[in-house]
């Protein structure tokens, strides 16, 4: 990698927030019971119950994939079906961990704009699933990614509409909240409004992408599901013995709204870029910029020019780039990207 490279590859590429490193340091004294029996992990249960304004169970886990797969495995039967967007991370990027941990659970793609699940499309899919027929996978859960894999945000009424359909047919509602804090900032609502009040039963709460290191969490609002989660986690080897260091991070993450401050920084960086590039000739935003990601269609020559100029980003097809802003993306990095895009589009033969 060039020393002057500017990185828009992922919110995984950034640093950990100093407050979370500090929290780990503070937790690093004395002894504590292992496997989540420590005082910090116990305190975390009450702290998140306060934050979400409802009784709940929190299970810190090492990765978002673990959170998604175990939350869904605990909500489903091995012959169950999980409905999700075709673009959902569980469907595209987790090597079918949902099926592995669920003992065979099937993923079923449902239409919706920009990585969302549409309530009517979900209803149609469930009605044609063959409920009760032993030839067919049986509907178990729906997975909603917030923010979506195209950086779009479900409004709370959209969440409520999908949840109402799911619950009417006995399905659990799972939210992949790898970017839940980014969504909260975008929605300007409370954690409760963005989750259980809108019908979410289980939440994969992202921490790592938004300044954490090595931890996310499963938050369970549906008490009947929680009983099995600890067994799924333990047999999968997903329970740290020194859990206190993960719990310390999550405590610090929600303290004084740190998670919202970090997410606001990332979202603002994306909004800044969007404001400068939207409308440039030869460029199209293929999804609304509502959180910290931009999906931008440009001529291949312009994308190649960005590569050459040392910008790091992933592609979603030959002419679509994904730029992700981190909590620690700087204004100078945003300005450099915008200036380069502007220059390359002017020079591009096809615009
Ligand atoms: C929407 C979404 N969900 C889940 C994950 C999984 O996280 P991890 O890579 O920690 O397993 C990611 C990671 O990129 C993601 O973007």
Image (tube, rainbow, N blue to C red):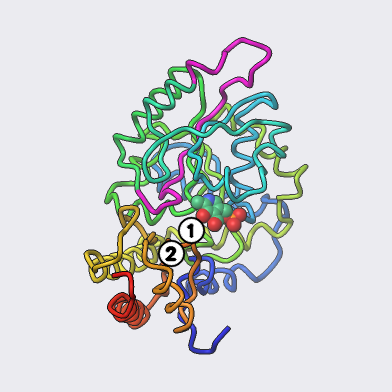
Report the image quarter containing ligand 1.
bottom right
Front residue of this view, candidates 338 and 241: 338
Q: Is residue 331 visible?
A: no
Q: Secondary structure at mark 1?
A: loop
Sequence-earlier tag: 1 or 2:
1
Position above or below: 240 against 75: below
Quarter containing the C terminus: bottom left
Magenta segment's dominant SS is: loop
Q: Quadrant of residue 236?
A: top right
Q: Measuring 47% from the left and 50% from the top, which residue is drawn there?
A: 47
Residue 86 locus on image (x, y percent): 51, 40
Specify whether residue 141 is painted magenta. Answer: yes
| Mark 1 nearby-residue class (10 Å; few <14, some 14–19, many ≥20) | few
Residue designated by label 1: 316
Residue 49 locus on image (x, y percent): 45, 43
Q: Measuring 63% from the left and 49% from the top, which residue is drawn there?
A: 94
Tell me if 265 is positioned left or right of 57 in this view: left
Specify whether residue 168 is painted magenta. Answer: no
């Amino acid at each position: 990698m060039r020393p002057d490279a500017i990185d828009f590859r992922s919110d995984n590429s950034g640093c950990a927030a100093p407050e979370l490193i500090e929290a780990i340091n503070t937790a690093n004294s004395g002894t504590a019971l292992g496997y989540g029996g420590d005082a910090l992990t116990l305190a975390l249960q009450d702290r998140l119950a306060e934050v979400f304004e409802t009784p709940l169970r929190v299970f810190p886990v090492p990765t978002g994939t673990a959170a998604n797969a175990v939350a869904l495995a605990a909500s489903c039967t091995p012959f169950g079906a999980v409905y999700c967007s075709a673009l959902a991370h569980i469907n595209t990027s987790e090597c079918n961990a949902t099926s592995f941990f669920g003992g065979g659970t099937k993923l079923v793609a449902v239409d919706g704009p920009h990585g969302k699940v549409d309530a009517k499309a979900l209803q149609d899919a469930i009605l044609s699933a063959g409920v009760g027929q032993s030839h067919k996978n049986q509907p178990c859960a729906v997975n909603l990614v917030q923010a979506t894999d195209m950086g779009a945000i479900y409004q709370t009424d959209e969440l409520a509409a999908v949840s109402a359909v799911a619950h009417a047919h006995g399905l659990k509602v799972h939210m992949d909240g790898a970017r839940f804090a980014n969504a909260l900032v975008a929605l300007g609502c409370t954690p409760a409004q963005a989750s259980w009040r809108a019908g979410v039963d289980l939440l994969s709460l992202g921490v790592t992408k938004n300044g954490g290191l090595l931890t996310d969490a499963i938050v369970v609002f549906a008490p009947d599901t929680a009983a099995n989660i600890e067994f799924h986690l333990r047999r999968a080897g997903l329970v740290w013995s020194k859990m206190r260091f993960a719990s310390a991070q999550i405590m610090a993450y929600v303290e004084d709204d740190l998670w919202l401050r970090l997410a606001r920084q990332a979202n603002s960086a994306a909004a800044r870029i969007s404001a400068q590039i939207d409308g440039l000739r030869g460029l199209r935003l293929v999804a609304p910029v509502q959180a910290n990601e931009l999906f931008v269609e440009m001529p291949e020559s312009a994308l190649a020019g960005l590569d050459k100029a040392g910008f790091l980003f992933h592609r979603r097809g030959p002419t679509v780039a994904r730029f992700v802003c981190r909590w620690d993306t700087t204004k100078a990095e945003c300005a450099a990207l915008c200036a380069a895009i502007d220059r390359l589009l002017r020079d591009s033969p096809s615009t």
